[in-house]
Amino acid sequence: MSSLRARIGYLGIADFDYLSARLLLLHGFVSTGLPKAAEAFEKLIKLFLILEAKITRNEELTTRNLKEYGHDLITLFGALKTKVPATFPPEWDEYLKLLQESYDRRYPEHWRQVQIEVSVHELDSAYTYLRNNVIQNFPPEEADRARHFGTFIYDAYTPQLREVVERLGGKPPDQVLRQSNQSFESLDIEPSRL
């Protein structure tokens, strides 16, 4: 897979994992929404590492390189903090720990009684912050495409598909993205694409 395709692919899939997490959390499905949020952040952080390797060392990270991190958000976030001179809010360590624990406890053999308070606004704020920083580091020739929320996946939402989704009682991605999203106006995306 080419580097461009990998970068745009990770971004599009991360965006839709995020939308899935939002939709689940907005409807009270915490046990499935938080693991999906973990997957969105995992992809964004891996994308950040891909871009960092390209920018600082002109190195193309492969899928194999990224698999070494597994699905461990804490390790990924640690790698990100050591490689990228960005300042992350201190509460992110706890938030990513919550997401990692939720991801690790997806199956009954890992369940135990737990009480979790979840804010979709915390998800929106963190995702917006990280996504905005990620797309600032895309090469100029890819920057416009990176500003298209959902990249190649969103391209499938033709007027006909949107009509089918709405007829079935669902909401198209742009409506899910905007619904109760206090961070929407801060999201660095091309609004005409939505």
Image: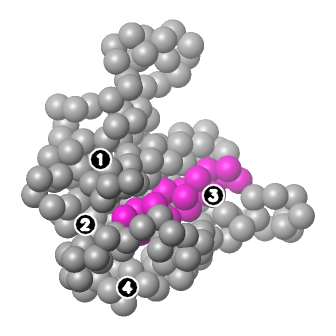
Please indicate whether residue 105 sits to the left or right of residue 142 in the image: right
Q: Mark 4 points at which residue?
A: 81
- Residue at horizontal 23 percent and vertical 50 percent from the top: 146
Q: Which badge, 1 or 2, comes first in the chain's sequence?
A: 2
Q: Distance between the residues labelled 2 and 4?
A: 13 Å
Q: Say which of marks 4 and 1 sits in front.
A: 4
Closer to the chain start, of discs 2 and 4, is: 4
Asked if residue 133 shows in the view, the reply is yes
Q: Cα distance, mark 3 to mark 1?
A: 22 Å
- 152 lies left or right of 164: left
Give the residue drawn at x 81%, y 58%. Answer: 107
Q: Distance between the residues labelled 4 and 1?
A: 25 Å
Residue tagged 3: 35
Q: Where is residue 67 in the image (x, y as percent from the top left)?
A: 55, 70
The residue that label 2 is drawn on is: 133
Which sits in the foreground, 165 or 125? 165
- Number of numbered discs on residues: 4
- The residue positioned farthest toward the front in the image shown: 1
Q: Going 41% across and 17% down the picture, which residue do you hit?
A: 162
Q: Earlier in the sequence, mark 3 or mark 1?
A: 3
Please give the label number shown on residue 184: 1
Q: In terms of secondary structure, where does tag 3 sit? A: helix
Indicate which label's residue lies in the foreground, 1 or 2.
Answer: 2
Please tell me which residue is depicted at 39% across the width and 10% down the height of the picture.
Answer: 160
User: In the image, is residue 136 part of the stretch drawn in magenta?
Assistant: no
Q: What residue type is labelled 4?
A: Lys
Type of amino acid under label 2 = Asn
Q: Which of 4 and 107 is in front in this view?
A: 4
Magenta segment: 30-47
The CA distance from mark 3 to mark 4 is 22 Å
**Residue 76 position in % (x across, y down):** 49, 78
